Amino acid sequence: MLASRLAALAALSLMSFAPAQAQPAAGTVPAARTIQVWSYGFNPQPIQLAAGRPATLAFVNQSGAGHDFTAKEFFANSTITAGAAPNGKIALAPHQTATITLIPRAGTYMAHCSHFLHESLGMHDQIIVN
């Protein structure tokens, strides 16, 4: 009888030290970033991302005019896992939102709107990936 009580006590003590349910590893859920687009700017400035960590970027065009977010080098140096940036560009119709999920590579990249004169009117930004 003493042996069965000791066995039960040992089993209870092992259960109290059982590991909790596994949590997702840090960095497996993409960080979400909203990039606001309007006539004539982007926000935030600069855009900061973590190198090698998945990020979902939501480009929200707040204006009644079409714009784009062109960052050829940035998109070329990132692994895109969802969405697309054909020719390094996210095209946005008036009031449109577009998302892309990617894993960026470390570096500093320039971005701009490629529409006529928009860059010179302030539609440019910097992407810093550390």
Image (cartoon, helix red, strand yellow):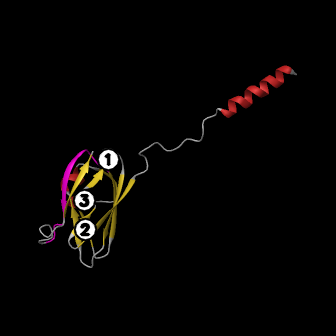
Determine the CA span between mark 3 and mark 2: 19 Å
* Residue picked out by circle 2: 91
Residue nearest the observer in this picture, 46 or 101: 46
Q: Position of residue 60 (x, y in %)?
A: 32, 68
Q: Which residues are magenta?
A: 103-115
Give whichever of discs 3 and 1 has the lower sequence position. 3
Q: Secondary structure at mark 2?
A: strand
Kind of residue sitting beneath label 3: Gln
* Residue picked out by circle 1: 50
Residues tagged 3 and 2 counted as in contact (Cβ below 8 A): no
* Residue picked out by circle 3: 45
97 on left or right of 72: right
Give whichever of discs 3 and 2 has the lower sequence position. 3
**113 is within the stretch colored magenta:** yes
Residue at point 71% right, 29% down?
Answer: 13
Determine the CA span between mark 2 and mark 1: 24 Å
Kind of residue sitting beneath label 1: Ala
